[in-house]
Image (cartoon, rainbow, N blue to C red):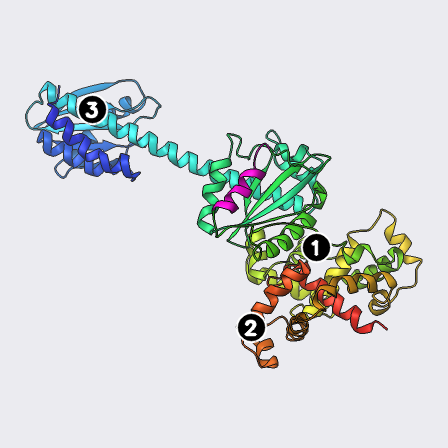
Amino acid sequence: MPTPQVLDELLHQLRPRVCQGADLDPQTLIDWLGRQLDAEIALVDRAGKVEVSTARLTPDILASLQPVLTQLSRGQLAAAASQVGGFHVRCEALGRPVPRPVLVVGSPSPLTRESLTLASHVGAVVEVLRQAQQADDLALRYQQAATRLRLAVFTALMAGEVTLARRMTAGAVPPLLDAERLRIHLLRCPPSDRGRLIDAYQDASGYHGRGLMVRCPVYDHHLICLLPVDHDGDSVDGGLAAPLRALVRDNPNYALGISAPVPLQATARAYDQARHALAIACHTFERVADYHGRPPLAGLLPRRQALAWAHAFLEPIRDAPRLTLDITSLALNFPRSGVARLLDISRNTVTAHLTRVQDALYLDLQDPHSRAELALALAINDLLVPDGNAAAEHVRTPSADSLLSTEAALTWAHAFLQPLQPGTHRTVHQTLRAWIEAGTDAQRTAHNLGISRTTVRAHLRTAEQLLKRSLQSPGPGTHELIHAFRIADRAP
């Protein structure tokens, strides 16, 4: 047996790799073993190639051993000894799965039993460390695959494709997809915390009990949590809702926005609601806010007239590829770079699809008014009933201004803008109008009003709290503000 001192030295060589999680370096161990035995060592991999070796074990010696190495690799032999030239050589197969790597030890004089035992120990250690490293690599690939699958399920739900989400997860359908309704809890936290939180609550299936946690592919500080709810609106996620609130309570850099319960097909609506709630939560003492919004404008307009207008508005892109329509819809809610990350395409591809839509509709999608009008048309179009197109064709197509002059629209706009009216909030109202006219550019707004950019941003944060809408990132909050101003300006 090797002496305790030699085994201690072997453990000393291994300690940095075991304790610090460093990758295996076979060359270091082979060189150390060569010095201990005063011998030449080589490690032949499963493909029969020399992976690492000491200096004096020449290719000629290894070439002469090729038939023996082949038998050892195939599992026909466990070990073999021979003499090649002036070298006494011992070969030993490592591990069990074939083809097997082989450890070759050569010395000018025969090795002692203790030396051969030490060589076997080192070979076994090398193989165990290699298998551990392979297991780590497999675990990492599994985690990456689980992450991609969770994101795919989320994006399918965002598109209202519940059946597609089930088909993508055939054989391992997440429990979330068996629920009728869900809430989205949108957690704002440092980007580096997201992976740790996902791993902490992940189960063996790669999901999170009955819930689903997804890194937001657009905003690095957002963690999206989809939790099923029962018929009373209470969470049945198996314990995720309470820990999320506790995380916010215990971490001053966290905030949480919670949507209302919605059907699975309306996940996109829940996400928008959670974004609005998060904008409010960031300005409250508890840093947690539930969504208590008003009904969206698209659902309040006269149905047949609204469908006729939306149908006519979108007609030029009716036959556009599905990808073009998906990119357009996403670009109304996220920055273009975010859309590219979400769909795993280049930003130039996103721009090309949006240019095609702009040219067809004669719109400038950099202009917030055009974006808001297109978003309204798409929202109305999403409300189509099976015979909605036919119903729309029998109605005279109204203009957008006449559609937004209805009593329902006026009531909605008045309720939307009412929090900005009293007292000092008129200054915020003025800033919001200037901000919209400046294309939602804070720097231009500050220049036009003769105030600082910091003041503009402060007014926007106040407006988010008052209106209970997210305004500082692209999305429905800005679109609704534009429609409310447009309606109010035409009101009697």
Determine the residue positioned at 62% across, 53% down: 275
Picture coordinates of residue 351, whole percent (x, y): 61, 64
Rendering coords of residue 196 (x, y %):
45, 42
User: Which residue is the site of mark 2?
Assistant: 455
Marks 1 and 3, the one that precedes in the sequence: 3
Q: CA distance from mark 2 to mark 3?
A: 70 Å
The residue closer to the viewer here, 65 or 241, is 241
Locate the C terminus and report the quarter of the image it occupies.
bottom right
Residue 401 vs residue 387, the one in the foreground: 401
Q: Is the residue marked by circle 1 packed among few (<14), some (14-19), or many (20+) residues within 10 Å?
A: few
Residues shaded magenta: 238-250
| Res 121 label | 3
Quadrant of the drawing holding the N terminus: top left
Asked if the residues shown at circle 2 and circle 3 are in contact, with their CB atoms under 8 angstroms apart, the answer is no
Residue at the farthest front position: 423
In the image, is 382 to the left or to the right of 336? right
Q: Residues within 10 Å of mark 2 (few under 14, many from 20)?
A: some
Q: Amino acid at mark 2?
A: Thr
| Mark earlier in primary sequence (1, 2) | 1
| Residue 456 sits above or below residue 302 on the image | below
Q: Secondary structure at mark 1?
A: loop
Q: Amino acid at mark 1?
A: Pro
Quarter of the image for residue 318 reads bottom right
> Horizontally, is 42 left or right of 219 in the view?
left
Q: Mark 1 — residue?
A: 321
Q: Nearer the viewer, residue 316 or 216?
A: 216
Is residue 374 magenta-colored? no
The image position of residue 139, as x and y in percent, is 43, 34
Q: Amino acid at mark 3?
A: His
